[in-house]
Each structure stands twice: as structure tokens, then as C-alpha cells.
Image (tube, helix red, strand yellow):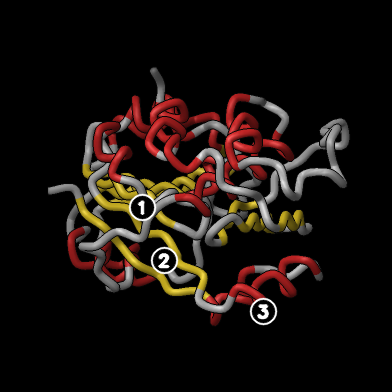
Amino acid sequence: MGLYEDLVDSVKHKSKEVVKDVRVGVTWTLVTTSKSGLSLTYSSFFDDVEEAGSLIRKSAGELLKNLKTFNLLKLSIGLATLNSLLDTPKDFETFNVLDYLEEIGKGKKIVFVGHFCGLDKIRNVAKELVILERNPQQGDVIDTASEYVVPEADILAITGSTFANKSIERLLQLSRGYTVVFGPSAPLSPVLFDYKVDLIGGSLILDKEKAIQAVSQGGKLSNFKKYLKYITIRRK
């Protein structure tokens, strides 16, 4: 089995949970079962959710099937469903992932997949810092260079949104260095440790109702991050 199959298998005992709410916002998707989970919203003009309007009250297992598709809009719903079913890790920590990368990245080649704010401090201590981005800004490298750049990284830091566009599995196959996956879309699952991930940084939703309102009204992360708690888990 692959990564997505293993993740789904890890929550199969919860597959009969009822889906209570589904919100597909412009930038974020939120699904509520017994808890709420997030995913970055990816879509193209041609993506279609055939059962839109009737997703609520389906079983979580039915929505998890969307993780098998390459329809990015449905995939976002599937990922948010998965994140809503994952148990809160018992051994989590609450340190800032970027601060930690600054600490361990001195003199190292660090590759970020995804553009993050606040990387100047890390750039100042790293031997080299490369940002791979699907929609590159000035100074970034287009993510099609991943095949060549990722294997050279001492530290690889991957945005959790790569789960929502199915690029994560190949990136993990290419990685030869210390590997971090983080962001609100990242599944807080020890399954990732079997795929060479060393550190996971994800989020818990503290105020479900306010997060739902923000997502439904087109909110970006900055609009509802105060309703999240960021936590990390490490491979032992």
C-alpha cells in the first residue's frame, strides 16, 4: 500500500462516523465529524463534486474515498475528513517549527517546498536555502526542479498542502535528509514516520464554530489562526 492507503487504514475504525459539516472555502476546506479537520483548497476549473449538497450525513468512510482521486477539489475534502478523524497525539510538543529549523539548520542546505513567511532568520544561518514553489515568487525555484534539488537537501521542510495535491509521496521518496512536514493540512499521524518523516507540525482546531465561519466566508489562514493550536510530534 502507499501513503494515502496507509493513512486511511489507520482511521478505518472510525469510517462509520457521520459527517456533520463540510465547508469548501476559497482557500481552506473544513470537514467536521466527531472533530473538525482542515485542508488547503485546491481546485481547477474542471473539478466537480458530483454529490455537492448531499455530503452531510454521509459516513466519513465515503468522504475518505476522495483521497484516491486526482480531482483536487474532492481530494481537499478527503484530506480534511482524514484530519478530522485523527486522534490528538498524546506526546505532542508546542515549539515553533521555523525556530527549530533555524536552530538545527546552521551550516546546512535547507530546501523548503512551499513558500513560507519569515525565512530570513533561517537563510542567515543556513549554508544554502532553496524554496521550491509551484507559483514561484522572486528568488524561488519552480517545483518541477524537485527531482534534482530535494535529494541534495540536508533538511527538507515540506508544506502540508502537498497532501492536497498529491505531490507529497514523491517528495518523501526523494528525500535523503532530515524531513519535516508542517502546516494546517499536515496529518498528525505516526504513519508518516514510516515514510521517512522525522517531524510533523500540524494544528488542532480550538474554536470550531469561529473557524467554520472564517472558512465559509473565504478566510485565509490569517483570519482564523487564532482559533488553532499548533503542535508537533517527532519520530522516536
The amino acid on which the numbered mark 2 sits, given as a three-letter code, is: Leu
Please report the residue visible at 68 percent of the width from the left and 68 percent of the height from the top. Answer: 220
Residue on which disc 3 sits: 210
Q: Are marks 3 and 2 in contact (CB under 8 Å)?
A: no
Sequence order check, earlier mark of 3 and 2:
2
**Image side of residue 72 versus residue 4, left or right:** right
**Image side of residue 6 versus residue 215, left or right:** left
Residue 181 on image: x %, y %: 37, 49
Sequence order check, earlier mark of 1 and 3:
1
Between disc 3 and disc 2, the foreground one is: 3
Please report the residue visible at 32 percent of the width from the left and 53 percent of the height from the top. Answer: 200
The amino acid on which the numbered mark 1 sits, given as a three-letter code, is: Leu
Query: Gap between marks 1 and 3, in whole Å?
Result: 36 Å
Does residue 223 lie above or below 22 as drawn?
A: below
Q: Are marks 2 and 1 in contact (CB under 8 Å)?
A: yes
**Image side of residue 57 versus residue 163, left or right:** right
Residue on which disc 2 sits: 119
Q: Residues within 10 Å of mark 2 (few under 14, many from 20)?
A: some
Please report the residue visible at 61 percent of the width from the left and 29 percent of the height from the top. Answer: 65
Residue 15 on image: x %, y %: 52, 38
Does residue 123 lie above or below 62 as drawn?
A: below
Query: Closer to the camera, 94 or 52?
Result: 52
Query: Closer to the camera, 212 or 119?
Result: 212
Q: Residue most toward the bottom?
A: 226
Residue on which disc 1 sits: 129
Question: In this orientation, does residue 130 appear?
Answer: no
Dot 3: what SS?
Answer: helix
Q: Quadrant of residue 5?
A: top left
Query: Gap between marks 3 and 2, in whole Å?
Result: 29 Å
Question: In this orientation, does residue 144 appear?
Answer: yes
Q: Residue most toward the top?
A: 1
Dot 1: what SS?
Answer: strand
